[in-house]
Image: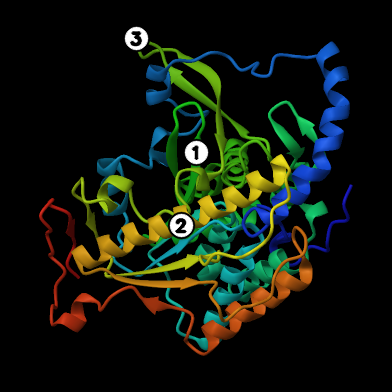
Amino acid sequence: MPKLFNEPTLQIQPFGRRIGRPLTGLLVALTLAQGAFAQGALAGERTKKPADARPDYTAAQAATARPEGLPASVRIAGDDVGAFQALIDGAPRAADPWLVLSGGGENGAFAAGLLSGWSERGDRPEFGVVTGVSTGALIAPFAFAAPTLGATADAALKQNYTEISAADVFEFGGTPDSLTDTWPLKERIGRAVTPALLKAVAAEHAKGRRLLIVTTQVDSERPIVWDMGAIAKRSAETGDPRALALFRAIVLASTAVPGVFPPVAIPAEAADGAGTKAKPFAEMHDDGGAMAPFYLAPAAALEGEARLRLPTNRVYLVVNNRLEPEFQMASRTTLSVLGRTMSAAIKAQTRAALALSKAYAARTGLDLRIALIDGRFAKTSEKPFDQPYMRALFAHGEALARDGSAFVQAHPPATALGRERRDVTDSTGSVTASR
């Protein structure tokens, strides 16, 4: 077992996530795992169990399912504009600035450093809504709970993103549904996500703020947005161990790279046709970044196909990735070619998501401010969770935030155009709220 670090205040332990920048480190894991996987294939065939031993359930049951023992209201489908509107309308502080945290694996050190430097600068907002995907899901609870936790939250993030190695995240050797096993990460999340942390999240939720983490429901092919504050409230008020277990499972699931890290089974139940008996089954959830690299709002709203009233005037978006192409010769191997192609695809996906978000901001007068890893940071990672690289990236984000140069406005905000209110409606009916 990998060595665990000493526990700081509130039993917050470091943890890590997706390999590489974004796929380079992943290739290392795949390459090393390939041999072990091949050697075990024949033996595995002789004692093979069904790859999917879960109880069957239907699309209709999936549509009415809720997490076992918890109300259905702790989550919504992330592509449901109406449900998202109702969720944010029920948050009194949703008009405050938002923080949106992208995926990016070890590059999450950038956001961790940025938040730390922002705190030192002294003008970091108490964000009305915080959303996290993938590595952003690991950062988001601490960013959200910072007003209650104080400096402990930033200290935990620094440890999480500067003191770990690949051994603290996964081990080689396939499971029935992945090439590696993330039991080290699961244990680390278990030590980080404590009742004390959930109590802090619940306290901030009670102020009208919202913490949202996204997973992908594998069976239904839909993004799921989890209201983590509502889950934390359930834990704080009742001590229900299922709420704590669910919070941990969601964070782990949002980081589960499909095929490389195992998906996470989340116990669920759905009423039968008479509405009197709950049918138990297990949903399969994995990487929130499979649907989009970050979550601002349902895609239909960003694309202008549906009407959405976003309460806030300002969103801070942190992209834990590089967008520019990087030259690296691929060898004539499946893994090398696949890895380089997927790296290009992830960057293209992120650029497309940024374009949609910028267009939405321009239509509605939203003041969208973006921070990303750009040409000001030249260091590269030589291996998964390379500590010198992560420490340098943390320090880079920290320095940018301290001197106020981390974020760039996507376009002039509405107030700069002489508008006091943001009751802006485009040709499709997309609307944002006034403040």
According to the picture, the residue beneath numbered tag 1 turns out to be: 216
Label pair 2/3, CB-CB below 8 angstroms: no
Q: Secondary structure at mark 2?
A: helix
Q: For residue 350, which numbered disc appears in the image?
A: 2
Point 83% across, 29% down: residue: 38
Kind of residue sitting beneath label 1: Thr
Q: Secondary structure at mark 3?
A: loop
Earlier sequence position, callout 1 versus callout 2: 1
Residue 343 at x, y percent in the picture: 58, 53
Q: Secondary structure at mark 1?
A: strand
Q: CA distance from mark 2 to mark 3?
A: 45 Å
Q: Is residue 56 above or below residue 99?
A: above
**55 or 10: nearer the eye?**
55
Earlier sequence position, callout 1 versus callout 3: 1
Q: CA distance from mark 1 to mark 3?
A: 29 Å
Point 20% across, 70% down: residue: 435
Residue 100 at x, y percent in the picture: 44, 62
According to the picture, the residue beneath numbered tag 3 turns out to be: 274
* Mark 2 neighbour density, 10 Å: few (under 14) some (14–19) many (20 or more): many
Residue 157 appears anywhere in the view: yes
Kind of residue sitting beneath label 3: Ala
* Mark 3 neighbour density, 10 Å: few (under 14) some (14–19) many (20 or more): few
